[in-house]
Amino acid sequence: MLQGVLARLDDSGNHVPRFTPPRCLLERQAVGGCDACHATCPHDAINVGMVGASIQIDADLCTGCGLCVQVCPTGALEYNLLPSLQSVKDQQSQPGAPAQDASLTCSQSGAGGPSLPCLGRVTPALLSAAGAWNTPLTLIHGACDTCAVGAPDVPARLERVLEETQRLRAPTGRPAPVTVRAVTPEDAGRALKVSRRGAFGAMFRAAGQQVAQSLPESPLPFVDWSVPEDRTPQEWQWRARTLKPAPPEGVGLYWPAPLIDDTCIDCPVCTNVCPTDAITRDLQPDGGVRLLLNLTACTGCMACLHSCPPQAIHAQDQWLPAAFQAPILLRESDSVM
């Protein structure tokens, strides 16, 4: 039973990703919009519509490959990251024990061990976690050229995700020890390796997961937009959490985010289009306005840059670790447009 529970890493049988409208650039009416999910889906399962119904997913066509989630610049589409993160953590070697690598395989590969419907669900946060835990992780894919779940270029996409991960992790001095490779005949008998601590944790989780398996398929719970912390997608929350070991204070972290110059006219456009409310506009009692940036909530989508009427916003890729500790003052003005 435990082996079966550990091997299931999908969202209780739910293959359709959760859609959070306030995070969608189409719903935010950002200039240029976004059709990344529609353009990426290999099964024509995603249609782009009008505001109020901007993203529509055909559950009959969706295979749960996750490629739309992988390319979404704002986390508007997402799967629950926790099962995959927990699996990698549970496979971590214990101090003094023989070294072992963790693995994730695609469901169509025929390899043993924990599997996902498709490795298109793998994102930088997951790979960065492997780096933070110093756990070698092997991603094993099958014959993507003929796979009906994902797309032929899934291995190439994984390499790009790994490149983004290594750029994120470079300041920590510990790159993510990740290998991407095709399945081999020996992988069919690959054992599910779990640490002693991970095994006990999985036993306690097993009952809850079995109950979830027996329930009718349903989407993940909606994001409670009244809770500011929930507006930041899991992906970016975990990217920030997994920046371990802590980078030196003077070393820049790769995290694309906006800066505002003096041509700003103090209009509210940047805050209106921000998909995670990372930019906030505080009106002051004296009639002034302050623009603040919560760096950890910024997904780097640059909707603010593309939508800014006077083009007063510019991207900055490198930030010192201290910038993540408190909101950044982007602009302070004594008048409002």
Image (spheres, rainbow, N blue to C red):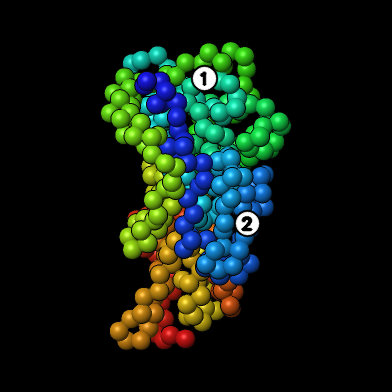
Pointer 1: what residue? 112
On the picture, is 129 further left or further right than 211? Answer: right
Task: Give the vertical position of 122 relative to 307 (above or below).
Answer: above
Check residue 51 in the rendering and tell me which mark sits there, or answer none: none
Q: Amino acid at mark 2?
A: Asn
* Residue 47 image label: 2
Q: Position of residue 93 (x, y in %)?
A: 38, 21
The residue positioned 55% from the left and 41% from the top of the image is: 64
| Residue appearing at x 35%, y 86% in the figure | 287
The percent position of residue 268, horizontal first and vertical second, equals 47, 77
Q: Is residue 1 above or below residue 269?
A: above
**Mark 2 to mark 1 CA distance (whole Å):** 35 Å
Badge 1: residue crowd in 10 Å (few <14, some 14–19, many ≥20) = many
Q: Answer above or below: position of 221 versus 188.
A: below
Task: Quarter of the image for the N terminus: give it.
Answer: top left
**In this picture, residue 25 sits left or right of residue 91:** right
Q: Secondary structure at mark 1?
A: loop
Of the residues tagged 2 and 1, which is closer to the observer? 2
Asked if the residue at tag 1 contacts the one at tag 2, i.e. Cβ–Cβ closer than 8 Å, the answer is no
Q: Residue 204 in the image: x percent, y percent?
A: 28, 28
Relative depth, front residue between 97 and 245: 97
Task: Residue type at mark 1: give it.
Answer: Gly
The residue sitting at 40% across, 61% down in the picture is: 294
Q: Secondary structure at mark 2?
A: strand
* Residue 157 shown left or right of residue 77 in the figure: right
